[in-house]
Image: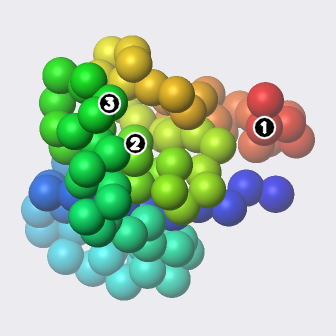
Amino acid sequence: MVRGAVAWVTRDPVRGAVGRRRARRHPHTLLGLFEMAAVDRAVLTGALALGFGNFEEAVLHDAAAHAGATGIVTRDLAGFRNARLRVYAPGELVRLVEAGTSS
């Protein structure tokens, strides 16, 4: 079973995938499917210490870690080179889920 969480950092995580117009109806969909990973002082402080080149990606990574995630799904694999969590491309995660594994 795969459980998921979404961290809303600065940009809407849906808009980039489906466009501004279609994205308006998807925040409710995401809230129905996923838990929200909190972004608080501890996450922001932890993100600063990660040494990522992009602060938003560092925040997303630290929010995921604080939420108990074991991995991150992103189209920007290069942005997570310093990740401590496993990083999946969307298609890779779909293949793993379909195969019944999460390693």
Identity of the residue drawn at 43% across and 66% down: 37
Q: Nearer the viewer, residue 97 or 63?
A: 63
Q: Residues within 10 Å of mark 2 (few under 14, many from 20)?
A: many
Q: Is residue 47 above or below residue 4?
A: above
Q: Are marks 1 and 3 in contact (CB under 8 Å)?
A: no
Report the disc number at residue 40.
none
Q: Are marks 2 and 3 in contact (CB under 8 Å)?
A: yes
On the image, which quarter does residue 94 sit in?
top right
Identity of the residue drawn at 40% across and 47% down: 62
Report the disc number at residue 61.
2
Q: Label 1, on which residue?
A: 102
Q: Residues within 10 Å of mark 1 (few under 14, many from 20)?
A: some
- Residue 73, x across and y down, in percent: 49, 40
Q: Is residue 8 above or below residue 97?
A: below
Element type where label 1 sits in the image: loop
Q: Label 3, on which residue?
A: 50
Element type where label 3 sits in the image: loop
Q: Is residue 60 above or below residue 7?
A: above
- Residue 40, x across and y down, in percent: 29, 68
Lower sequence index among marks 1 and 3: 3
- Residue 15, x across and y down, in percent: 19, 57
Q: Quadrant of the N terminus?
A: bottom right
